[in-house]
Image: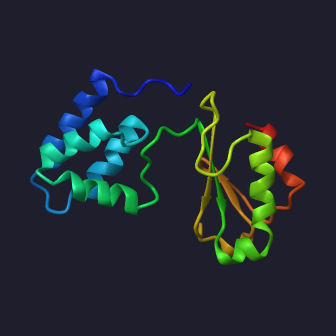
Amino acid sequence: MPKETMTAENFQKLDELIIREKETKGALIQVLQKAQDIFGYLPLEVQQKISKGLKIPMSEIYGVVTFYSQFNLEPKGDYLISVCMGTACYVRNAQPILDEISKFTGIKSGETTPDGKFSLLACRCIGACGLAPIITINEDVYGRLVVEDVKEIMEKY
């Protein structure tokens, strides 16, 4: 399972962040990003604390968190695998690559393995269309892929 992040120490960091940023106009997205860095995701308790600290309604916070794809409501695995499904990648057979990764990990897009090692995400354009099809695993980028590349890449992790 992913390591516990809902600690008193992390909530103290969040309190300090809110105090530092509460007077900054338009600080919500920055606070959410930093809170996600602290906790690994944005559980309801964290959103409520931000809401109270920044005096922003929960409905607005939830709207921002669910609108922007970089925010996570559930914990992610140690390795976040993002498969680009933008137009260039899709027409160059990204779907079979996603299917192969899904088969290898035993999870579908949007899921995390029970051991917390991998999370899989089919995402919009990564912005490296010249390398299509492309995947990222955390900060590592793999481009011009074919299905046969998947096993070797996954075994590295």
- Could you tell whether 45 is left or right of 86 in the image? left
96 to 87, vertically: above or below: above
Percent position of residue 82, x then y? 63, 54
| Residue at image location 43% in from the left, 38% down from the top | 40
Whether residue 89 is visible to the viewer of this picture, yes or no, is yes
Q: Quadrant of residue 93?
A: bottom right
Question: What residue is shown at x 74% (from left), y 48% (from top)?
Answer: 102
Q: Quadrant of the C terminus?
A: top right
Instruction: Tell me: 121 left or right of 70.
Output: right
Q: Is residue 101 left or right of residue 30?
A: right
- Considering depth in this image, is 141 or 10 the residue closer to the camera? 10
Q: Residue 51: x, y in percent?
A: 18, 47
Q: Image quadrant of residue 145? A: bottom right
Residue at point 31%, 60% (across, down): 63
In the image, residue 75 lies at what x, y percent? Answer: 48, 38
Task: Say which quadrant the N terminus sits in.
Answer: top right
At 26% from the left edge and 30% from the top edge, which residue is drawn? 11
Residue closer to the observer: 50 or 149 = 50
Count of marks, rendered view: 0
Q: Is residue 122 above or below residue 101?
A: below
**Horizontal and vertical percent for residue 33?**
35, 50
Q: Is residue 114 left or right of residue 72?
A: right
Residue farthest to the right, as pictured: 148
Q: Is residue 20 visible?
A: no
Which quadrant would residue 43 be assigned to in this image?
Answer: top left
In the image shown, does 87 or 38 lie closer to the viewer? 87
